[in-house]
Image (cartoon, coloured by chain):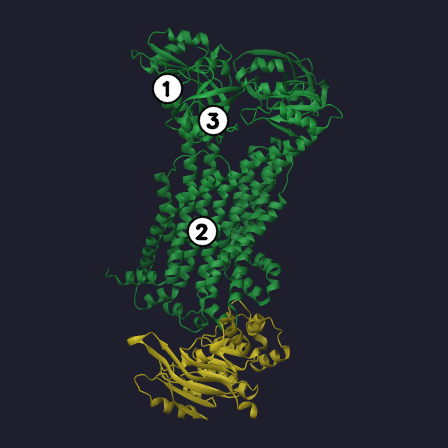
Chain colours: A yellow, B green
Amino acid sequence: MPLHSAPAARAQDLKKIYGTGETAVHALDGVTADFAAGEFTAIMGPSGSGKSTLMHCLAGLDSATSGAVFIGDTDLTTLSDKGMTQLRRDRIGFVFQAFNLVPTLTALENITLPVDIAGRKVDQEWLDTVVTRLGLTDRLGHRPGELSGGQQQRVACARALAGRPEIIFGDEPTGNLDSRSSGEVLSILRAAVDEFDQTVVIVTHDPRAAGYADRVVFLADGRIVDEMREPTAERVLDRMKQFDPASAAPVAE
Amino acid sequence: MSGNPIRRVALRNLAAHKVRLALTVLSVVLGTAFITGSFVFTDTLQRTFDDIFGDVAQGVDVRVSTEQYGTSGVPIEAVDQVAALPGVERTSPSIGGGIIVLDSEGAAIQTGGAPAEGYAYIPPDRLVGEPETFVAGGPPAETGQIALNESAAERGDLAIGDSTTVLTISQGMVPVTVSGIYELETDTGGYIGALFTEEQASQLFTDGRHVGFLDVAGDGSLSPEQLRDEIAAALPDLKVQTGAEVTEETKSQVAEALNFLNYFLLAFGAIALLVGTFIIYNTFSMIVAQRLRELALLRAIGASRKQVGRSVTLEAFVVGLIGSIIGIAAGVALAYGLRAALNAADLGLPSGPLQLSPRTVIVALLVGVVVTMISAYAPARRATHVPPVAAMREESTATVESLRIRTIIGVLCAIVGAALVVVGAQQVGGGAAATVGIGAFLLILSVLFAAPALSRPVVNALGAVFARPFGAIGRLARTNATRNPRRTAATAFALTLGLMLVSVIGVFGSSAKASVDALVDNGVEADFMLTGPQMFGVPAPAAEAVRGVDGIEEVVPAYGVQAKIDEDFEFGTGAGGPLQDVLDLDMVAGAFEVTGDEILVSQTSADDHGWEVGSTVPLTSRDGDTVDTTVAGIFADNQLIGPWVVSQQLFEQFTPPNNRSALVVLMNTVDGADPETVRASIEEAVKDYVIVQVLDREQFKGQQAQQIDMLLAILYGLLALAVVIAILGIVNTLALSVVERRREIGMLRAVGMQRAQVRRTIYLESLLIAVFGAVVGVVLGLAFGWAFVRTLADQGLDIISVPWSQVVGMLVASGIIGVLAALWPGQRAAKTPPLEAISDM
């Protein structure tokens, strides 16, 4: 499909340096990567490899020290805070590790929040599709406190999907979930790509989660060190074992 | 550095969260500053008055005076009689009276409520007591010279040799030249003391046969007490006291006169305590809730419950102590600023050094430290009872507790309170007012208890109005404001209390003005009136000056007459002319004409005493003279003229010349006269009496309203303090809840909320809380005001008026206050980086 040939997001010689001089830490040390549209990518690496920083920079949550980030054709480094906020609101969806729902709003209100903030009308048909697909129909009136962790994360996924963003980022989206709920959430993200034609990029250290992706990008010490297509949990686990065992991330919680 | 690890963690944590620490200290500062400020302000007022009145009889062994105020004084013969007694070395008479001194521009020098008096100068060789010390010039040597106290001379811009005018009641304008300026130890508070020669003082302030009072110095052969007894035996009709007794009496009189102030102080101090306590408690509940995780961590690694509790308490002690000390300093500054503001508004409060009494410091410290410790300990205790692991894992730290019990208590209080208020409002008098007071107190309690439960529906309703146009932002603001009802209620409470009192006072003022207006509209027919300053009135010569002015038909001075009927002194009216021509009076019996020893009585008086036309009513003056008057008529009750009316002749018989000023001079114009021309003529006739004002009916009403406003302004000034504290309390709570919601705000930013939208959310949330507080306060205040005014129906407050424009103004202002309070917290919130949503706390 030609639509999928252009990258949905792109990092170009991205550097992120914390501190200066002797104590400077290169969180990202010249990362260049494309994230193709309609693909499910997992970014993996040991703790401190820079995988979260890379995602934050791609998603416009953090700014890089040098290099460029593109969402579609837009160069994020040229955007003001306002423009960046608008981009996050209109073109990006987020799923966080800690669910991050507004506790005072109902599930439905949380799902439509970004659209409401933008002052746009909710596409009711699309919303119904998403809500039904995610099995949230009879949970819409509940507040987050009345939902299980898995249900909250499904609400968060629905929130990310509701605005039909160009790309959805997930920051350890299964980090706080048991294995059954993890499976549900990952299936949803997989389905978002397969059924709704979405682009998904997640950061994870769970090889099982990576197994749902089309492609895995491995980071170590701020650089891309490897890439894997059609990954399986076993292959990813094997690859991860090659990293310095001292700095290897725990495989499971 | 202490080796105690728990303490180290506590201190490190304090230092690590600087904003949180600053806000915590700020809450204590606000609470204690409010308490200190109100105490200092009222203490200072009291002390200033004490200074002015307290030190009155220095060096005096015995003072001879009359039992009653407002009398002619001590007869001249008594002076000689005392001087001739054995053991008496010197006697010095006090001759004096109220005056008004004009400044170099010809305007009256304002005294700010302090007295302005003219005195006879008694040279040191004859004086009993402390002689004046002259800083410039010398004592008055001849008629027409005066010496002034330093501050009066300064305020009047008068120097030695300057000519000016003194107004006296008996003789009107008296031209004078300043001969000297003297020092007054207690020269504070606007007091004016003008020294005249003894001769001129007698002429101005006495009838020539009396002196005000007589100070006596013994030759040392008798103790003051013996001297007192000797003189008392010689002068059985007069009051004879030792100097110490006089000082005591004056002090207690001042204290009594200031009693209203003390009650006000008590009420105000109670409000200060309540509001201060609330702010501190509120803040600490939030802080400890935020620290639950940290406390849980300490518990998880093996700290005992006791250790954690102790650490929190110690921290609170330090914060409370530091906050209280800063708060005391801030309170003094607050009192200073408040006084400056009131003076700038020309309310003329007496000035004096600010009084910071040990009591103030102790109370502020105690409240600051103890309330802080309790506020910190209670939630910490609750926190330590949560299993550590649960607390650490908890995502939202808000512990939801049932509001049921406190709401039930609140509703019960409200029912009983409302019943008492309504029942009390059905009657008049002190008992009824007390009933209303108890009811009001219960209702305030009910707000304390039930406000959290009340906040949800009220804020939601307000939100439906104010937040609806803001869409999703509005919904977020509304849900935030109802998220923690206890906190919302506690935050709004200070504003509720402040605006409740403002509303009560507003209803009083508005009703008083409406009642006066109605009185003037229905009862006064005069076209013009002359009025003078309070306590001074219109000097007799000014009233004379308008007689014969072109276009004036009648000039009727109305006097206040005090006389004893049966056992009680009453205030009646002396008619200096045909009152019936200038007032709208209904006669029940007889005609409205009073001459010689006749008296007109009100229907109520007549019924009370069983009088009818022709009855004999004995009136006794202050000096003890009794005149048998004959009832010439009975009039329908009238607030303007009181229980009875006597003739000018009787008024003069009962009133020494130095007190014969008219309360008001009423004038009728001839038919067809042009009001503007007549007014100009009247103004011309009295133009030298700068303090005399020419008013038509509308202006007269306006002047009465102004006097009421002046009174209210002082109360509003004090309440402004409560409102300022309330605002800062809102700022504090909001800032803390912004800190608390950092992660959530970060998430909102991450999913695309603009900074301006974040700010707007906080503004709206604050607006909703503030308006909620204001609505509750105003509703209660109006109800209390209505009930209190009804109990005062017999005092002339017979019309209840709600100051609607003020009510609307207050509600609008509270909204603005809410937004202003949210400015800083809103800015902070908007700066939250979206990454906060992801980073660990």
- Element at badge 3? loop
Tell me where residue A10 appears, x and y as whole percent: 47, 85
Hey, what amino acid is under mark 2? Phe
Q: How crowded is mark 2: few (under 14 residues within 10 Å), some or many (20 or more)?
A: many
Query: Which sits earlier in the primary sequence, circle 1 or circle 2?
Result: 1
Quarter occupied by residue B416: top right
- Residue farthest to the right, as pictured: B672
The answer to whether residue B366 is above or below residue B244 is below
Quarter occupied by residue B241: top left
Q: Which of marks 2 and 3 is in front?
A: 3
- Element at badge 2? helix
In front: A104, or A14?
A14
How far is disc 1 from disc 2 in space, using C-alphas?
49 Å
- Answer left or right for B663 relative to B253: right
Q: How crowded is mark 1: few (under 14 residues within 10 Å), some or many (20 or more)?
A: many
Tell me where residue B96 appears, x and y as whole percent: 46, 18
- Answer left or right for A102 relative to B667: left
- Residue farthest to the front, as pictured: B161
The quarter of the picture where the C terminus of chain B appears is bottom left
Q: Which mark is residue B358?
A: none
Hey, what amino acid is under mark 1? Gly
How far is disc 2 from disc 3 in space, using C-alphas?
41 Å
Tell me where residue B546 appears, x and y as whole percent: 64, 21
Q: Can residue B230 be seen in this view?
A: yes
- Element at badge 1? helix
Q: Which mark is residue B115?
A: 3
Q: Which residue is drawn at 31% across and 87% down?
A: A244
Q: Which of marks 3 and 1 is in front?
A: 3
Residue under mark 3: which chain is it in? B
Q: Are marks 2 and 3 in contact (CB under 8 Å)?
A: no
Q: Residue B243 carries which label?
A: 1
Residue identified by numbered label 2:
B278
